[in-house]
Image: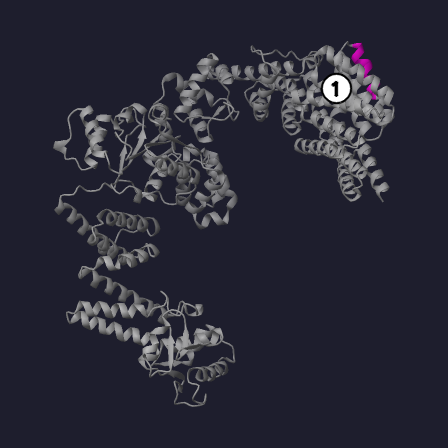
Amino acid sequence: MFTEHRSYTVAVLVIQVLGRLRVWHDDLEVDAGPPARRLMLGVLALNAGRLTTRRELIESLWGERPPSSAVNVLHTHTKHLRRLLDPRHSPRDQGGVLSTVGDGYLLRLPEAALDLLRFRRTMAAAQRAGSDGDPARAAALFREALRLWEDDDPLCDVPALEDHPKVWGLKAERRRAQLSYWDLMLRAGHAAEIIAALAAQGAANPLDEAVQARLIRAYQATGQRTIAFERYEATRLVLAEELGVEPSEELERAHRHLLEEQESRGVPRIPRQLPAPVPDFTGRAGELALLDAANARRPPGIAVICGTAGVGKTALAVHWGHRNRELFPDGRIHLDLRGDDAEHALPPHEALGRLLTAVGVSDQDIPADTQSRAARWRTETDGRRLLVLLDNAASAEQVRPLLPGTHDTLMVITSRDRLATLVALHGAHRVELDLLPRTDAVHLLRRLLDERAGTDPGSVDSLATICARLPLALRLAAEYAGAQAHLPLAGVVTRLRRAGPLELLDWGGGAAIRHVFGCSYRLLDAEAQRLFRLLSLNPAPHSTPACVAALSDVDEIGAARLLHRLASAHLLRCDALGRYGFHDLLRAYAAEMSLAMDGEAERQAAVDRLLEHYCGTAVEASGTLYPGWSGSWRHAGLALKPGGVTLTPGAALSWLDGELASFGTICQFAVRQGRPERAVTLAAALHRYLEAGHGTEALSIYECAVDAARGMGDSEGEAHLRTNAGVILRLLGRYAPAVEELSEALELCRRIGNRHGQARSLSNLGIIEERLGEFASSAARHSEAIALYREIDDPFGQAAALTNLGNLEESIGEHTEAARHFLAAHDIFAALGERAGQAIALSNLGQIYSSLGEDALAVAKLREALSLFREIEHRDGEATALSNLGTALCRQAKFDESLWHLEQALAIFQATKHRYGEASVLNAIGEALRTMGRDGEAAQRHRLALAIAAETGDEDERGRAAAALENLG
């Protein structure tokens, strides 16, 4: 651009402001100085030929708070600028390029010396040529004027002047010049010469209606009518989305010219029927990518978007359609099939008539019968790149007659049904739409609530939870919050929780939550409706077919069939494990319908069957996995009856793992339903399973069940459950509350004469006393427990107590006695088929053999124990075996293998929050590292073990860590 000045040989000086600020002396560009001086020169150049007051310069440089030295600084800058602009004159010379006039400065430049003056002179000449009827010369002068601009923005490298009124005024001059030039070229029939520049400006300024109108005219003039229509539609949508306004008269006029030309040529109108996209569309990146992939397939064919009511199926389809409108130059059709209303669903015959009308077939040319209409539709769509959005389809049967004969047209179908037939027979690409992820749900609410969301993010998160992350509910809740402007968001959340979300979100006519759920419900047959209602009685987050069979009093095959029907209608969700559930809003609707339609006797019978299912299956599963433990229930006076199913060990463990998150909820539900004995039964049946690394869940279950037993006056049950709770607290390393719980259980057992309960409490108190270093007391507890178990002929309890006594003897160095007791325990457990007990005994034996230096035997026993623990998925037992095996391998100098086993054990103990085990294995890792000569790392592990042992009061591991650290120095 700078070469423009070379033809002005008279002017030594050239200043450019139409882009960057640049100063030239002949062909040499000179530095204009520091930012403040460049800013001052920029203001002076904008006012070239007119006085620039000191006040204007000071405000430009410093704003409203100039320094006291401002005038002196201006004088300094002026002196340097005079030297820069006119080096032949003295800086004090007032007759040069820059002079002081009164209370300001005057920059005197000839037109040739300033690109701004040349631009204005050339523009004036262009306008005169246009008025004189010389469009060719006018166009040439416009081009010359616009070429003077190096950048869209004047003084673009002087950011402090970005908002200066004269800069904005100069931008407006350039815009007028561009528009005038484009108008001239369009009138002269030279649209092809400017279409590239117009398209670039249009892409950079999508909201500039004047540019967009001229771009539409240019496309029309060059025969690109489809693209012209697309450009109008895109501009209309962005104006609606970004500004909430309709197109201006200028843009509408360009559109009318297109339509008039189309009609005069007899060209069928291109359908543009997609509804306006929802504002603030949020998330769904994965689903949009799936639609992109469906369209990218060759041939593209059919995409089915399915999901529950209110999840945003139509919003996704419309958003994708608008985003990809340029891919469908022959049009976008939208047809609501009204599948949510069985009585008013659109028949294929009528739907075909509307589709044919959309592609330009006149009423008189539309065939009378359905088959002929379908054939005509296939003819009309052949070779046309159309997007057809069939919204709200009821079934595949409703849609199949509407499918085109070729794959040039992309069919996007939304439905609450999975439309399996379309996928199976027509290769449809299914996009399952689930609830919004929490981050997207919160983001949507923040956008909808605007400033209010920033003041109370906690309430925004609560609102997302109340609305079950369902997009329709989120939008209605935001609208409700907006109507309650007098309430803080926390108040809105409180009101929603108090009245129930269905009650307060039940507005908006056809958009109301209750209405849209009701439409899906009414499409079900009576059996499926009944099951949908009864499922609301199960408080667990999910239901298996076996659970549903009990709840609804049908066989499991019938239950699976009904569940599939509900899932296909997206009234239930099925997870990867084959369990079914629904979100909170659907649950609330199902509960509301059950209260209205199911009698109290039927509801209570369903609840009884549900609780019987959970208790019976828990007893069956525990009896399968831990057969020796059933004697504990019997001795505690608990009559636990297995369910009517037979479970393999794998199925038993799978069921327990799958329902773990539900057990606490079911216990609390049983108490609320007036069936506290069911809570006691369920908690008692789960004890051995809960011991195996599920301590956190166990404590909440036992808290509920102990209260239930106490409330019933069931002392046997209370004592048994309190002992169970004490065991869990012990395993978690919380010794003080464990001792309190076990001591109270022991006293209660003594009062009611329950010798089995006494033995269990004594044995567990002995374990804790061993951990706390109280060895004599611990030995006495274990001996008393063994004697009690023998008196009542409980071999399982006897074997468990022998194991505990062996652990004590091993910890105080009595290895031979410990081994004898472990072997005796193992034999009893093996006779009882109690694999967990066998594994524990084997693990303990392995540790003893390792201590005695019989490393090969130790490793063999420990590997056998580890295999058993893994078979029954006893996590804490697995970790103990891994830890003992790591120690044995270290003795064999297999250091890498040793550390790998120890680190695996640590990870499990940390995951199950087994604090004693964590401290023990940290000490073992420290000892292994020290053996390897890695003393610094060893000390770090021992310090961690010491901190945990101090926290839990574990004297055994505390002393072990302290001694190791002392030896390490």
Q: Nearer the viewer, residue 498 or 889?
A: 889
Q: Seen in the image, is 248 located left or right of residue 455? A: left
Left or right relative to 34: residue 776 = right
Q: Is residue 832 magenta?
A: no
- In-front residue for pair 522/287: 287
| Image x and y of residue 146, in percent | 30, 68
What kind of secondary structure does the magenta stretch mostly adopt?
Answer: helix
Nearer-the-camera pick, 150 or 412: 150
Which of the two residues, 724 or 637, is positioned nearer the viewer here?
724
Residue 363, image x, y percentages: 14, 33
Residue 46 can be seen, yes or no: yes
**Which quadrant is the N terminus positioned in?**
bottom left
Q: Is residue 789 magenta?
A: yes
Q: Is residue 733 visible?
A: no
Instruction: For the C terminus, give its image quadrant.
Output: top right
**Residue position for label 1:** 748
Q: Quadrant of residue 879?
A: top right
